[in-house]
Amino acid sequence: MFDILSWFYRYIFIFLLACFLLVSISIYFYNKRMLQPFLSVIIIVTAASSFALLSICGETIDYKAVYIGLIFCLKYIIARILLIKLLRIKDILLYDIVNMLLAVGLAMLYRLSPDYAVRQSLFTILGDTTYFFLFYLLKKIDIKKDYSKQLGLVILVTLIITQFWGISISGSKNWIEVLGYRFQPSEFLKILFVIYISAILSRGLAKNIFLYSSSSIVIAASFFALQRDLGSALIFSAVYLILLFVTDDKIYPTLLSAAAASVMAVISFYTFSHIKSRVEAWLNPWRYVSGKSYQVTQSLFAIAAGGLLGTGLNLGNPKFIPAVHTDFIFSAICEETGIISGIIMLSLLCMATLIGLNFSKNCKEPINRLICLGLSSMTGIQTLIIVSGVLNIIPITGVTLPFVSYGGSSLISQTMNIGILYFVSMNEKGDKDE
């Protein structure tokens, strides 16, 4: 019975995602704000129906799935009301898109492992409290002051601590354990780095500023290479090049930086064995199908097995993919809910990036414009990197799919990203009103 229900639910799931995307497009591009309540309805229906289906996949009803679905829906409704009433956020579309991605990710995580979903649901609640904490904190800080030196020092000290006292998980030494709790400092350093580089480049691009900012990214990327955190090194470098390109009146500083990054990548290939191994697995995946390419080949098999519509929730075999709950959750989504669902998910992530870029365009202050550009670009770049990795377009880098993959550090840093975007955008509007 469950197999039949799951098979039919594929069509309902794709329909709900497609409706959500079309309504979001209508609101964003055609200013149809009267459709905004429909997004909330679709999110609640998607979460409730997905967890209802998962609750009957066994011989008895799994009430844990029901509780997680209800908790998520209540969390979303309450947080959405508070964001509008207390923080005066009018452009709530970005928050709705984020929660649709969270709903899909949470349902897939429960299908993979209920324990992951339970922890992730707690992270989503903590993430929503981050919005209010950020607004309170940022209002207490004089954001017009230059904090670049302090931020640079915090970033450097954190990188040094991680290098010498960090712990290795899955081959990467990018974790720190405090009082029994582990977290990834690099996830939070991404945000600090964007603010830090934006503060520097907002002064203009004189020779000393170019050398200062370039040396900063070289130092950060070098630490990440030593920590075997290829994904963070790539994201930091890409975001820096984008911010530099926008600030650059002359094209040669950007070209010089891009060339230097390419040279560093080649040197890293010959210097670090783990980078060389990943590149070899990318170039010849079928040659090492039972070894270093096992992860990516299983990802390709899973996506191919799902086809356009998917096998049905809980009817595929995504657990054959190592780290499927983090790096490769996109493959699991494509296998069980279809490539069409995967494409819609990517479209929603593109919309989230576009909304952030629009915030940047509307900012008058150079530093605010660069911060919004950097933070929104980071979401787009991270999505591009991980999806390209699971499709074997580029080597695997070990980053998460924003708002979908499992991970407390990743999810909380991404909600901080959205919170800062909202605060900077509203702060600009407040300055204009004055």
Image (cartoon, grey):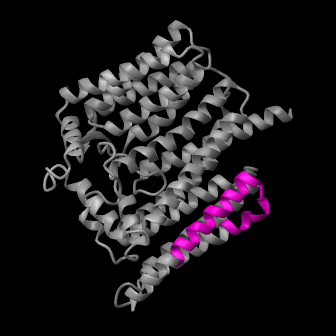
345 vs 291, left or right, is right
- Residue at 73% in and 28% down: 364
- Residues in magenta, as a range: 12-39
Q: State which quadrant residue 283 falls in.
A: top left
Q: State which quadrant residue 154 falls in.
A: top left
- Residue at 61% in and 29% down: 370
Q: Quadrant of the N terminus?
A: bottom left
- Residue at 19% in and 46% down: 284
- Residue at 82% in and 33% down: 432
Q: Nearer the viewer, residue 138 or 316?
A: 316
Q: Nearer the viewer, residue 11 or 216?
A: 11
State the predominant SS element of the stretch in magenta. Answer: helix
x and y percentages locating residue 307 in the rendered image = 38, 69
The answer to whether any part of residue 38 appears in the image is yes
The answer to whether any part of residue 74 appears in the image is no
x and y percentages locating residue 101 in the rendered image = 52, 60
